[in-house]
Image (cartoon, grey):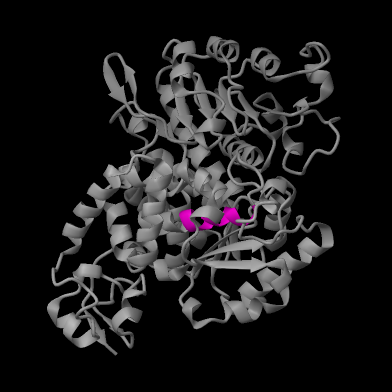
């Protein structure tokens, strides 16, 4: 569909046409188009190609010093000329990614009410719960194929940002397009405004959301149910991605709706897949260096929320796939949360935490001062892999990293909390404390390190390596559901692209500039897995690349004619 379009035919003319971000080309409109579309006088007489516009826009972006101001500049560009916005991303994705998404999007969400300029997506507020079908019925949304939805309660590691959480769906969908080529007209960001428990926001006269304490319990569940049923009715074949819901809601919502429509939770499953892909690559590299493969690893996860449980579950399955008996898995996984090491006797364990809870008898001698904390676990479990999804900065301190490094030649350390201010440790510190032996990947971007006199980029375990390709693969073959095995396939496809594994460099993950290539590989793996899982119609694998290409949009100016 997206590749077959050779021209735009529109009834819009003049200022109405320039106000449409999909159709607007600014000075890219030719003399002939200005004649037929009533644009003379509304534009300066100069004409510029898309390439020229990209160069000028990149120059203007580079001149802006503050990252938040850069973000605002890009969001304004997206709201006025989407083709130019995505052409700029295509031109330099490495520069744009941290501005469009983490870490800058965190600050953008915190100041969303102040920087909000033009409507994008839908704010579905609880007081409008009886109008959901009417709101979604607007013809502007007819082409919607991918929805990212948040309720703003757990934005990155920043907590409850209410309606400001809309920055997350907007940013995620920008990457669906920028990395995988999903047409921007086929994406719809949604914020479920169920109030906020952030009193600072509720007392802020500039706050644009519903100034009410968050609804809970049956009222919340019923509102989400109304939303899902409205989506199913309006968009029966849509891909719905849940984003940044609080732990109390994230896993239950996924469990409730995963068999009702094509849906997944990126914090649980996307984060798990990218972390698993990087760790599978690290384990393969460690095995080559004599440090043991995946089955030899002992994994400690700091943070028992949805992300930690999701990562643990996928790595647990990877070990089962390698033939480790389920009865032995407790020796390979330890999860630490606020109470310390999670035990089978720990009160109020979630369903996601239960597979990782240790028998108290097995760890009875580990406690120090009545508590088994992260240091005691790393030391006594002979840990080789340390994953942080705690949202708490600095918890991977020098004694912990040095203890980890005693147990293996290539310690694997993933401080994944974001934004950068929430990271458990900096890559530089981890490498210093491990005497340069650690394999490190972070959740947010860090500047390159100088190692042995050479600059080396720091790997970022960013979900952008996974979810765009997941979406593209699903759309390409019309998958009806999202299965767990599709995420394992995605993780393995990512691991296969590791420069370290391929002998092409020291990094675990490909550079951000290669995210489009990565998305195509993930899409292919996901599509094949969907067919194997019986959630997609049979297709000729020889035609799969064509099926995928048919859903990839490229930011180019097309001729525009009056309808």
Q: Is residue 164 magenta?
A: yes
Q: Determine the image quadrant of residue 541.
A: bottom left
The residue lying toward the viewer, choosing from 329 and 120, is: 120
The kind of secondary structure the magenta stretch mainly shows is helix
Q: Give coordinates of residue 108: x percent, y percent.
A: 50, 48
* As drawn, 478 above or below 276: below
Q: Would residue 31 be found to the left or right of residue 420 on screen?
A: left
Give the magenta part as a residue range. Answer: 162-172
- Residue located 35% across and 71% down the image: 22
**Quadrant where the C terminus is found in the figure:** bottom left
Q: Give coordinates of residue 32: x percent, y percent.
A: 14, 82
- Residue located 28% across and 76% down the image: 4
- Residue located 86% across and 30% down the image: 345
Q: Give coordinates of residue 397: x percent, y percent.
A: 58, 16
The residue lying toward the viewer, choosing from 347 and 475, is: 347
Q: Determine the image quadrant of residue 288.
A: top left
Mark yes or no: residue 405 visible: yes
Q: Give coordinates of residue 137: x percent, y percent.
A: 57, 81
Mark yes or no: residue 553 visible: no
* As drawn, 549 above or below 376: below
């Amino acid at each position: 569909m997206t590749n077959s379009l050779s021209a735009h035919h529109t009834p819009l003319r003049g200022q109405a046409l320039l106000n449409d971000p999909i159709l607007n080309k600014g000075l890219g409109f030719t003399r002939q188009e200005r004649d037929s579309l009533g644009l003379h006088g509304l534009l300066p007489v100069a004409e510029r190609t898309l390439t020229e516009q990209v160069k000028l826009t990149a120059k203007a972006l580079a001149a802006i010093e503050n990252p938040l101001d850069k973000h605002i500049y890009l969001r304004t560009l997206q709201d006025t000329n989407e083709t130019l916005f995505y052409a700029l991303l295509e031109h330099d994705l490495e520069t744009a990614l941290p501005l469009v998404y983490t870490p800058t999007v965190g600050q953008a969400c915190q100041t969303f009410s102040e920087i909000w300029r033009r409507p994008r997506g839908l704010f579905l507020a609880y007081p409008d719960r009886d109008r959901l079908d009417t709101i979604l019925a607007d013809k502007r949304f007819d082409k919607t194929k991918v929805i990212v939805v948040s309720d703003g309660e757990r934005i990155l590691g920043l907590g409850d940002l209410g309606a400001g959480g809309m920055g997350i769906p907007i940013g995620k969908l920008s990457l669906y397009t920028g990395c995988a080529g999903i047409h921007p007209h086929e994406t719809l960001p949604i914020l479920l405004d169920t109030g906020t428990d952030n009193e600072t926001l509720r007392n802020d006269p500039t706050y644009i959301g519903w100034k009410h304490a968050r609804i809970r319990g049956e009222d919340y569940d019923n509102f989400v149910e109304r939303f899902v049923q409205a989506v199913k009715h309006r968009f029966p074949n849509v891909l719905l991605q849940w984003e940044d819901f609080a732990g109390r809601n994230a896993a239950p919502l996924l469990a409730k709706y995963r068999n009702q429509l094509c849906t997944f939770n990126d914090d649980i499953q996307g984060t798990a897949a990218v972390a698993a892909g990087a760790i599978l690559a690290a384990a393969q590299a460690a095995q080559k260096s004599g440090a043991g493969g995946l089955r030899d690893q002992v994994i400690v996860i700091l943070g028992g929320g949805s992300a930690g449980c999701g990562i643990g579950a996928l790595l647990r399955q990877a070990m089962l796939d390698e033939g480790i008996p389920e009865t032995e898995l407790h020796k390979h996984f330890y999860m630490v949360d606020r109470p310390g090491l999670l035990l089978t006797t720990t009160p109020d364990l979630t369903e996601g935490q239960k597979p990782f809870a240790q028998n108290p008898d097995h760890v009875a001698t580990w406690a120090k001062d009545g508590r088994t904390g992260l240091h005691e676990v790393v030391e006594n479990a002979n840990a080789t892999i340390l994953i942080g999804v705690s949202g708490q900065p600095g918890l991977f301190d020098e004694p912990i990293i040095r203890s980890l490094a005693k147990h293996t030649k290539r310690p694997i350390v993933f401080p994944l909390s974001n934004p950068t201010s929430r990271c458990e440790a900096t890559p530089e510190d981890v490498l210093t404390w491990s005497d340069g032996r650690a394999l490190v990947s972070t959740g947010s971007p860090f500047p390159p390190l100088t190692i042995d006199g050479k600059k080396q980029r720091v790997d970022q375990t960013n979900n952008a390596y996974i979810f765009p390709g997941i979406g593209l693969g699903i759309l390409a073959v019309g998958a009806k559901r999202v299965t767990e095995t599709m995420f394992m396939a995605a993780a393995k496809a990512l691991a296969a692209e590791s420069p370290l594994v391929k002998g092409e460099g020291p990094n675990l993950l490909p550079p951000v500039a290669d995210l489009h290539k990565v998305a195509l590989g993930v899409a292919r793996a996901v599509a094949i897995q969907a067919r194997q899982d019986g959630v997609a119609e049979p297709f000729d694998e020889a035609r799969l690349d064509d099926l995928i290409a048919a859903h990839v949009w490229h930011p180019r100016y097309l001729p525009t004619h009056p309808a």
